[in-house]
Amino acid sequence: MRITGRRKAIALFLILGICLVAATVALTGIWIILNWRERVLLFFGLVVLLAIIVGLILNTVFLVREIRRNEHHDSFINAVTHELKTPITSIRLYLETLQRREVDETKRQKFYGLMLDDTDRLRRTVEQVLMAGEVGYKRTAQKSLEIDLSGLVGECMDLARTRHNLQPAALHWQEPAGTNGAKIKVPGDPDELRTAISNILDNAIKYSRDTVDISVWMDTPDERHVALRVRDHGMGIPAGELKRIFRRFYRVSSRSASQVKGTGLGLFIVRAIARAHGGRVFAESAGETRGTTVTLELPRSEA
């Protein structure tokens, strides 16, 4: 209901802006016809006309952007509320069960494990929100070390398998071609790069639908850069939204993607970290239901 109301407001502002521009053009045209012999008045009239039209267009664009931004903020708040409320409710339920009933040791240990999983989910949500606030203002990485990118990717893949209870075959790693076993190193902050890679993997897993089948590989587009590519065979992304998914709070608008829970901050954090390391991130997709490839490109360390 709230989203529908905002769309109506956007349509109203657009129609109002168009009507005001049309009315301004009509009135100015009449004024020019009545004063066509006065060249000075005609010149200033045209200047005023252009200024008013530009002002109306800019004002309409600003209002529409603010409405959309508020819509994204509301979606983010709803998503974060769900991400926080669900594990808290789960933990409380298990604790009440342990308090009120006699539970055998096997089931007790199972409850402890589930509660630990819920606390991990809470911690990740809080960390993402805090990280989004931090990276939004940073221009460069906090520290720069020589990092073995292949080793770091391997750690992130193992962590993703454990976190999502996946079989080893769900994530495929392909050794970089043409390296002859040599390590590909990049300068940067290992903690931030670990966060970026983990966010890309988590995003690919979440949008893989029922079967997780993700390919991870690296290549060198030129002598100075290395590209880490993560491809899933999931929901895919419409062409018009490939760049928008890296905005803060933005989430794909398709019906299937809207059912996936999240805060809309993961890829925004990836983009901020990539820029802080002098790199970039972008996504490619053949369309909905046809999978997505996310590429993180970073500068290589000098040999």
Image (cartoon, grey):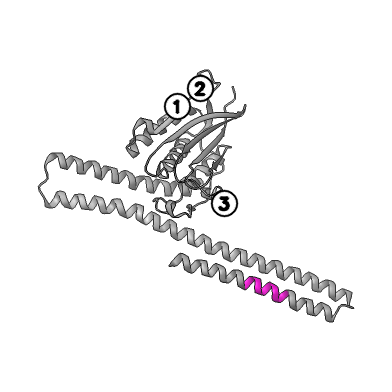
Spot occupied by residue 186 in the image (x, y as percentages of width and height): 54, 29
**Quarter of the image that includes the N terminus:** bottom left
Label 3 vs label 2: CA separation? 37 Å
Residue 233, quarter of the rendered image: top left
Residue found 55% across the figure and 42% down from its top: 282
Residue found 45% across the figure and 35% down from its top: 194
**Quarter of the image that includes the C terminus:** top right
Q: Nearer the viewer, residue 39 or 289?
A: 289
**Crowd rating for badge 2 (residues with CA inside 10 Å; few <14, some 14–19, many 20+):** few
**In the picture provided, is 293 more to the left or to the right than 45?**
left
Type of residue at label 3?
Answer: Gly
Residue receiving disc 1: 151
Type of residue at label 1?
Answer: Gly
Residue 129 counted in the magenta span: no
Spot occupied by residue 108 in the image (x, y as percentages of width and height): 16, 42
Residue 299, quarter of the rendered image: top right
Residue 23 counted in the magenta span: yes
Disc nearer the start of the sequence (2/1) = 1
Disc nearer the start of the sequence (3/1) = 1
From the image, give the main secondary structure of the stretch colored magenta: helix
Q: Secondary structure at mark 1?
A: helix
Q: Secondary structure at mark 2?
A: loop
Position above or below: 220 against 61 = above
Residue receiving disc 2: 183
Label 3 vs label 1: CA separation? 34 Å
